[in-house]
Each structure stands twice: as C-alpha cells, then as structure tokens.
Image (spheres, rainbow, N blue to C red):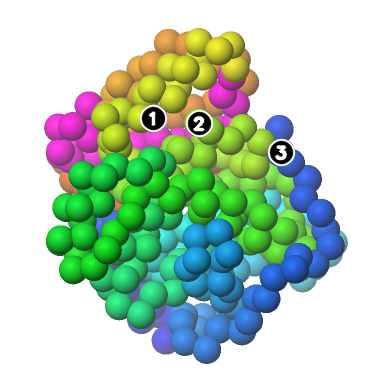
Amino acid sequence: MLKTLRAAAMAWTVLVFPAVVFSQAQPNMTFSPVVKGLVLQDVECSEFHSKFTGHDYHVYVSLPASYLQGDRRYPVLYVPDHEIAFLAMNINKDILTSPPAAVEEFILVGVPLKSETPADWSRERTFDFTPTEVKARNKSLSQRLGGEVHTGGAPMFLRTLKEELIPYIESKYRANSDRGLAGYSDGGLFAAYVWLNDSNTFSRYLVGSSGDWDNGVLLKTEAALAKSGKTLHGRVFISVGSDEEDEDVRAFKNLTTAITSHAYPNLRMETHVFESTDHRSGGVGAFFSGLKFLYALPKASR
C-alpha cells in the first residue's frame, strides 16, 4: 500500500502540481479520526471543519524517526494542498533525513481539503490560496468549473492555520515554535502571501512557482513593506521553471530582484530557476531543493 501511494506521489510531482508562541491548552476545536482519506504507516490522520473558510480539511502528521526516543521538541513544516503534495514532501523528508542526513528532523503536517469532487476541490482551493478578490477571475473560473467561485480567501485560510490548526498541533505533539510553510503553484502563491503579510507565524518558506496574481499584488506588497521601513526575515526558498509561462517567469524575476535590492539583513533567501522545466514538472525540484535549503544541517553534523 505504502509503495503504491509513494509511486503515485512521484507521478504527481512529475505532472504538477521571530515566532509567536501559541497557547498549549487544547483548542476548542473538534479534530475527528479520518474515515475516508489516506491510510499510511506512521502517519496520524484526523479531520476538522474551519469556522473561518467554511471548508473541511484532512490533517496528516508524519513524525520524525527519533520522535519516540526522547522528549525533544521539533520544528514543524505545514503543507496545505492536495494529499499528493503531502506524500511527495514526505518522501523527500524520508530521503533527506536518512543517514547520512542532509537536513534536520522535523514534523510534517499536511492540510489538504476534504472535498467531495475535483471541481469542489478546485473551487475551495482557489478561495483558500488567493490573496485578494478579483471579480473577473471569479466569473471566468465559475464558468470553467461549473459552479460559483470566489477568490481572495487567503486571509481566512491563514486564520485557519493560526487559530485552529497550529494550536491543535502544538498541544498534541512536541513541536517548538519554529514553523515552516510550503506550497507549489497556488499553494506557493499562498506561502508568498503569508511571508509578505505576516511576519510572526512562520520563519521558513518554500515558494514554488507562485506566478502572478491581481496585477502584481506580491510585488506591490513587498514595495510597500520596504518603503515603510519594515523588514523581511527568516529562511526562504523561491523557484520557477525556465519553461513556464513568460508572465510567471517574469513575476518570479521581478519579485526576487526587488527583494534582493532591498538587502533585508535578517533574510536568508535562495532563488532557483529549474532549466528545461515547466509548471507541471517543477514540483520535483522545488520540494527537494527547498527542503535541503530550509532545513540544512551544518556540514559538521552530516
């Protein structure tokens, strides 16, 4: 079963797709055992309904190999999006933390939508991951997906993570306050939005092929932030494929050039253009290389 699911994850990756301390008290939320979803060895599963987005989500938790061997607390990497994104990231985590380990151990949390149909998933995903409402996109996506679509729900989904999911994870597992957020495509757009708009919740970001949204909203946000004298910090990996749409490559270059030019002193950023790679195949390099940068062990520890 596990081998079959891991093979599916690899197939998907070829096709596509300072911190706040939260209260350790059990949150006033119901996280129920998963009835219908992934069943994987050593992955704990539950599900919940968000009062902010109105959507249902699975929660998949993969613990480090050493978790049961002591009382150490671990960083946590959150991966919203489809189940297969969690599977692909989990495979890379297993590879990179196996001896000789290239990255430190961390808790991996997948937060995929629990949707009844692919169309429902697409509609809900679009709401969760887009930073602003664009009415023209609402109309075009509604026609394409055969149902009402609303954009601009990223602030609500961020509240879902901050006020519902993170308190649950940090009350149930030995997690420290070092949190990461990873996404690809629209998931990368959401990760970039959070990075530029919320400076406290996460300290590591994997932004894969985020593209553009609402006439350069990410670039405008970064420009306003720099002008205000505020700063970006943390560790960030940003990537794009060389064969993606011209506007997506241009958005990547404009944003990374602007950030580099502002020389934020507490920011460690790595950017990468994957050659001969389009949007469908870019997830392979983004996940693997992103993890290596975000959680790299000191060379003396390898």
Amino acid on which the number 3 mark rests in the picture: Ala
Tell me the SS state at disc 3: loop
Badge 3 density bin: few <14, some 14–19, many ≥20, Cα 10 Å: some
Is residue 148 rendered to the left or right of residue 6? left
Tell me the SS state at disc 1: helix
Quarter occupied by the C terminus? top right
Return the residue at label 2: 196
Residue 258 percent location from the top left of the image: 39, 16
Please tell me whether mark 1 or mark 3 is closer to you in this view: 1
Disc 1 to disc 3: CB gap under 8 Å: no
Q: CA distance from mark 1 to mark 3?
A: 22 Å
As drawn, the label of residue 237 is: none
Among the two numbered marks 1 and 3 on one chain, the one whose residue lies closer to the N terminus:
3
Residue 34 percent location from the top left of the image: 55, 84
**Is residue 233 shown in magenta?**
yes
Splitting the image into 4 quarters, where does residue 210 fall?
Answer: top left
Disc 2 to disc 1: CB gap under 8 Å: yes
184 or 224, which is in the foreground? Answer: 224
Amino acid on which the number 2 mark rests in the picture: Leu
133 or 256, which is in the foreground? Answer: 133
Is residue 282 rendered to the left or right of residue 152? left
Return the residue at label 1: 218
Return the residue at label 3: 19
The magenta span reads 231-250
Residue 62 percent location from the top left of the image: 59, 68
Badge 2 density bin: few <14, some 14–19, many ≥20, Cα 10 Å: some
Q: Is residue 178 above or below residue 18?
A: below
Q: CA distance from mark 2 to mark 1?
A: 8 Å
